[in-house]
Amino acid sequence: MIQRIQTVYLLLSGLCAVLSWKIPFGKVELLNQPVKVYVANDSFPLTLLMILAILLAIIAIFLFKKRRLQLRLSWLGFLVGAVTLFLEYSIVHGFQTQAAPVQRAYYWIGIALPVLMMLFFLLAALGIRRDEKLVRSLDRLR
């Protein structure tokens, strides 16, 4: 299970989802108020998406004997990362286009976590596909 590189990629994608609860993806400066930071657990849809990404990564790790299902879960995790990135972008962009009370809204380092999560799910899917091709070629030789 751990000998396969896609297991490491799936672990890293789950770690990115966990870190998004702590590392802010955006900061908003309101007039005469302290800076407000936004993390994934500030929004209910983002929290659900992060929980889903963590579960997909963990389940895919333990489905190492069912490579086709593992591949589908990896692609689904990639899509979850894309939706997460879109939601985080739209939250900060919504503050940027807002009028008077918002002095400044900007992205923070946590906006890269969904991109990394998508990258790791993609690398895991490519590794799983490579394993599937290898098993099929060995089955032809038998």
Image (spheres, helix red, strand yellow):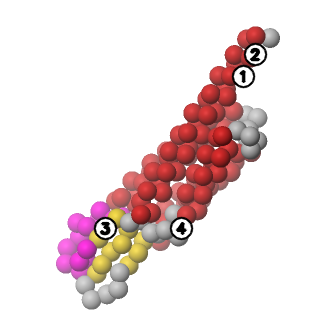
Circle 1 sits in a helix, a strand or a loop, which is it? helix
Per the rendered image, the range of residues in magenta is 91-104
Query: The C terminus lies in which quarter of the figure?
Result: top right
Q: Are marks 2 and 1 in contact (CB under 8 Å)?
A: yes
- Residue type at numbered disc 1: Val
Residue positioned 73% across, 34% down in the render? 66
The relative height of residue 8 versus residue 93 in the rendered view (above or below) is above
Residue 139: give its label. 2
Image location of residue 68, percent across then percent down: 66, 31
The residue at 53%/67% (across/down) is 21
* Left or right: 96 as drawn, with respect to 123: left
For label 2, the crowd category at 10 Å Cα-Cα, with few meaning under 14, some 14 to 19 and many 20 or more, is few
Q: Earlier in the sequence, mark 1 or mark 3?
A: 3
Crowd rating for badge 1 (residues with CA inside 10 Å; few <14, some 14–19, many 20+): few
Residue picked out by circle 1: 135
What distance separates the C-alpha of mark 4 from that of mark 1? 38 Å
Residue carrying label 3: 106
Q: Which mark is residue 21?
A: 4
Amino acid residing under circle 2:
Asp
In 3D space, how far apart are the residues under numbered discs 4 and 2 (Cα atoms)? Answer: 44 Å
**Amino acid type of disc 4?**
Trp
